Amino acid sequence: MSTATAFPRRLAAPPSSKTSSSSSPHRRRVCPPIRSASVTDFASRVAGEWIGHKADFAPDGEPLSLPSHLVPDAYREWGQDIKDWQTQCSTTVRPARDEPGGEVGEGGRLVLYAKDARFVPVVGCEADASTIESAEKHEFALDALATDENADGGACFGCYSGSYLDARGSEIVTHCVVANTSPPIRVRLSHRADGAGVVSVWREALDDVFTDGGVLASSCGGNSAVANFAEYPRDAEDRIRGADASFLDKLPPDATFLPVGIWFHVEKNDNAGEHDGSYASTLGYINGDSREHVVSVRSKSPDGVVRASFERRPCA
């Protein structure tokens, strides 16, 4: 268990950008692999320390509780369990480990680096800083990543989708959609490509420049806009109906609706009862402050062809 670190005053987040103009109010872009000219803009949008909360959900959207041995005694005495982890994700674009040196945009193999830390649960603000319970690191080859900047010359907000193999050799699909707020708020989702296991969801706000976790978030949870969310009402369908009704016809009939305007859909294709490696995966997020509905779609065919797209829809 790491030693708690004091948390200094936060730096101001960079100003949010505006959605570029288009003949269609709903901007949907199909994304080829990221272009070298796109790297610097994407890197500047995605890099930083992102704080918030993470929850694991069953495929039907039911939130899962944290392990009982991590629940503080006070919560047990009150008969409460905990559904959310307080988290911090350190994110940046950098040269791959086997290619030391070089700057972003100079060429060479670049990766999206993400270190996900989750913190020991506490009661209220009983500690000045958080203590790390565990941390996982992932690297995504940038040339295999889909982003919201690398098609049609549109504005970049730092959205992306990709996949990787976990320690057991299972393919993990991941999405990240970013709301045009100040500071930016993003939602991430990951799940196994074969549809087994839990679906993990993060809701995070940009809080500081990238330090690789050198500064830890306050145990009080930081930005209230990304507070714990798993046990809130599952309102995503109502939000879509009220703010983006024209999207209802595009919703998968078996989409899973979560709290705070988040929804997802995971479809796997079985061949004679065996997973053939293909999938279709979608993450959507309606943010009331930015009045937009951001959707990331990613699929892989049985012969391995990957398609990805992003859509940023203005809402009422």
Image: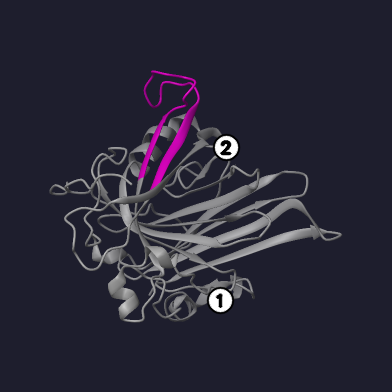
Q: Nearer the viewer, residue 200 or 173?
A: 200
155 to 78, vertically: above or below: above
Q: How is the image coloured?
A: one colour
Tell me which corner region of the image, top left, top right, bottom left or bottom right, holds residue 123.
bottom left
Is residue 148 shown left or right of residue 12? right
The residue under the point 16% across, 55% down is 128
**CB under 8 Å between discs 2 and 1:** no
The residue under the point 23% across, 58% down is 219
Q: Residue furthest right?
A: 272
Image quarter in which the C terminus is found:
bottom left
Is residue 109 in the magenta section? yes
15 to 150, vertically: above or below: below
Tell me the crowding category of disc 2: few under 14, some 14 to 19, or many 20 or more residues within 10 angstroms, Cα based. Answer: some
- The amino acid on which the numbered mark 1 sits, given as a three-letter code, is Leu
Is residue 241 shown left or right of residue 254? left
Q: Position of residue 36 (x, y in %)?
A: 47, 29
Badge 2 element:
helix
Q: Position of residue 225 (x, y in %)?
A: 28, 65
Report which residue position mark 1 lands on: 248
Q: Which residues are magenta?
A: 90-116
Label whose residue precedes the other's in the sequence (2 or 1):
2
Q: Residue furthest left?
A: 9
- The amino acid on which the numbered mark 2 sits, given as a three-letter code, is Ala
The residue under the point 25% across, 61% down is 221
Is residue 197 in the magenta section? no
Q: Nearer the viewer, residue 51 or 177?
A: 51
Report which residue position mark 2 lands on: 144
Whether residue 155 is visible to the viewer of this picture, yes or no, is: no
Q: Position of residue 184 (x, y in %)?
A: 31, 55
